[in-house]
Image (tube, grey):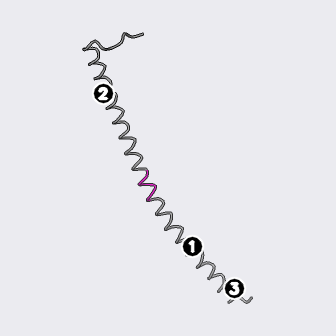
Amino acid sequence: MNADELASVTLEHLRAIRADLGDVKERMNRVELRLSAMEQTLGSLYALAGSDRETVNSLARRVERIERRLDLAEAPH
């Protein structure tokens, strides 16, 4: 193989590598976008869970007050 053929083959390989690398970059960009969306969704779910937990705690306190007022609460053990 002479120098020109070697250079030609090398350039072909480099072009193929560059094309593959471009595909990988594009896929990574899509993965990053999806990961970002998942992180935002997860953050929203955590916020909602905290809000729901506070709502349940508030309702439990209200039920306890109602039970005490109606003398329905059991004596503590």
Q: Which residue in the rendered view is the most extreme toward the right?
A: 1
Task: Specify whether 26 is left or right of 45.
Answer: right
Q: Residue at x 74, y 88 (%)?
A: 1
Q: Which residues are magenta?
A: 33-38
Measured from the top left, where is residue 39 in percent x and y?
A: 43, 50
Measured from the top left, where is residue 58 in percent x and y?
A: 30, 27
Location of mark 1 (residue): 20
Say whether marks 2 and 1 touch (CB < 8 Å): no
Say whether marks 2 and 3 touch (CB < 8 Å): no
Q: Which residue in the rendered view is the most extreme toward the left?
A: 69
Q: CA distance from mark 2 to mark 1?
A: 58 Å
Front: mark 1 or 3:
1
Front: mark 2 or 1:
2
Q: CA distance from mark 2 to mark 3?
A: 78 Å
For label 3, the SS is: helix
Q: Residue at x 46, y 55 (%)?
A: 35
Give, as a three-letter code, the residue at label 1: Asp
Q: CA distance from mark 1 to mark 3?
A: 21 Å
Earlier sequence position, callout 1 versus callout 3: 3
Location of mark 2 (residue): 59
Characterize the magenta stretch by its predominant secondary structure: helix
Residue 6 has which mark? 3
Measured from the top left, where is residue 18 in percent x and y?
A: 56, 75
Q: Residues within 10 Å of mark 1 (few under 14, many from 20)?
A: few
